[in-house]
Amino acid sequence: MRNRWLYICAASLSMYLAFHACQGEQAIRTAQYTVNGQRVYAAHCQNCHGANGEGLGTLYPPLTDSTFLNEHRQRLACFIKHGLTGPIEVGGITFDTEMPPTPTLTPIEIAYVLTYIGNSFGNSMDMFTIEEVQAGLTACSGDSTIK
Amino acid sequence: MRISDILAATFALSVVVACQQPTETSLPILGAREPVTKVVDGQTVTDTVYHTIADFRLLNQDSVFIDNHTFENGVYVANFFFTHCPSICPTMQRNLLKVYEKYKGDERVRFLSHSIDFRYDTPSVLKTYAGKLGVTNDQWQFVTGSKAAIYGLSDSYMVYTKEDAAVPGGYDHSGHLLLVDKDRHIRGAYDGTDDAQVQLLINDLETLLKSYK
């Protein structure tokens, strides 16, 4: 009888630990992607979109509109890789400056920078995996409009 | 009084002296200068000729020609950029916009952005750009001109500009902001992509304005 209680305690403790270990791993990966993403952001995005994602006037849109980011989650990788033409509405304001493509970025770099943007500037999105980025790039097949 | 007290007092005094900001009362005049000797009323007088911004006449965002006289009643900040520049320009213009907003309505300070993309940046393109940037009055002028006019003028402002197919956007240039006084002399050059340098520009601008009071 006494042993059974011990077993139950040990089992629930290990389950608790396993659960938290997994969560920790996910958080660590997100943090890793965010740190790497900040470097990609500084090199390729910051000039126009600003150090705090504030954008510039109505020339370059801010990256603080979580609704826009969530609505276009599947297309974000394509915007970065292939650029973006045509008017878009961000935060209730219309922007119509062509975003240049950045074809040199690899899917992992795009996953990094999207995770960074998605978890900075007041945004809170799940991390972007390389698989998700690759699926997004395949789906848009080089198209640079918002659709 | 013990020796340690004297030492402590000396140390404290040296810290106070060392921490005193040098009070800059006038800005230097940048660029080459040469002495000119002439005879006035039988006396030999030596004068210094400072580097001066050359004459210019360029089309602005309203398709109106502007020249040096547009800026003669105050000081101005000049730079070189182009509207679809993917590299340093957005950061440089974002920083200059902060200075513009600080002095908006103050007619003593003007701004002059030269486009080095003489092919694409027509007055209407510049007008659209200025509007989107948030420039709403004529205190900040955006100008275009022939390649010879703009690139020649950039030498006068001591700014590097070059058409170069190898760089993103097709034009290479430095991101400097130049502070020019009423006599067309350059009084300061600041890296427009560096926050600390832009703050220095704002400080120097105040110093320069005070010198005209």
Image (tube, coloured by chain):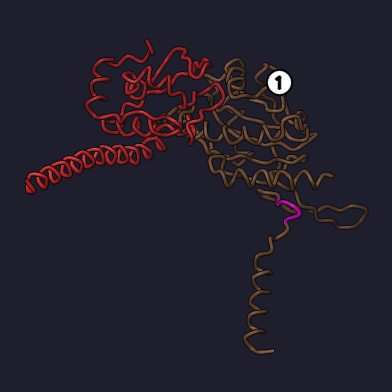
Chain colours: A red, B brown
Tell whether position B3 is magenta. no
How would you classify the magenta stretch by its main secondary structure? loop
Locate the C terminus of chain B and report the quarter of the image it occupies. Answer: top right
x and y, in percent, of residue B48 in the image: 76, 52
Q: Residue at x 57, y 47 (%)?
A: B196
* Mark 1 residue element: strand
> For the magenta stretch, what is the residue range?
B24-28
Q: Which of the chains bears the disc numbered 1?
A: B
**Amino acid type assigned to the residue bearing label 1 in the image:** Phe
Callout 1: 10 Å neighbours few (<14), some, many (20+)? some
Front-most of residues A106 and B174: A106
Q: Circle 1 is placed at which residue position?
A: B65
- Residue B185 occupies which quadrant of the picture? top right
Percent across and percent down for residue A78 are: 32, 20
User: Which image quadrant for residue B153?
Assistant: top right
Which residue is painted at 58% across and 27% down in the image? B115
